[in-house]
Image: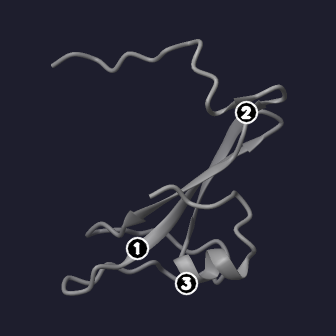
Amino acid sequence: MGSVEVDPFDTTRWSTTGWQSRSVQRLIDAGNAAYCARCDELIKFRAKVKAYQVICNVYVRGRWDRVEHFHPDCYQQAGSPYGEPSP
C-alpha cells in the first residue's frame, strides 16, 4: 500500500493567517465515546438508526488545537461556529 501524497502548495484550507477551523458531518461509529461540545451528552451509536455527528477540527492562531464533536441539532443551535459541515 502506498502512502497518501500531500501537495504542499494546496491552499484550499489555508488562509493568510494559517489553517482555519472546519467541520464535517459523519455517521456515528460503533464504540463512539465522544461528548457533544454544546450539551455535554454522549453522542450515541444506535444499531438500527443511521445517526450523524458533526466533527470539527479547531485551529487557534493558525495551529491545530483540538477536535470538537456535536449532535447536528446542537451544532446548528450553536450557530455553526466552524462553518457549514462538509458531507
- The amino acid sitting under disc 1 is Tyr
CA gap, disc 2 and disc 1 = 27 Å
Q: Is residue 3 above or below residue 21?
A: above
Residue matched to label 2 = 63
Which residue is located at x 63 percent, y 61 percent?
Answer: 84
Contact between labelled residues 1 and 2, with CB atoms less than 8 Å apart: no
Q: Is residue 14 above or below residue 5?
A: below
Position of 3 with respect to 66 (left or right) is left
Give the number of the mark in front: 1 or 3.
Answer: 1
- The amino acid sitting under disc 3 is Glu
Which residue is located at x 28 percent, y 79 percent?
Answer: 50
Q: Is residue 28 above or below residue 24?
A: below
Per the rendering, the mark at residue 67 is none
- The amino acid sitting under disc 2 is Arg
Q: Earlier in the sequence, mark 2 or mark 3?
A: 3
Residue matched to label 3 = 41
Q: Position of residue 51 (x, y in %)?
A: 35, 79
Q: Position of residue 6 (x, y in %)?
A: 45, 17
Give the number of the mark in front: 2 or 3.
Answer: 2
CA gap, disc 1 and disc 3 = 14 Å
Residue matched to label 1 = 52
CA gap, disc 2 and disc 3 = 27 Å
Colour treatment of the image:
one colour
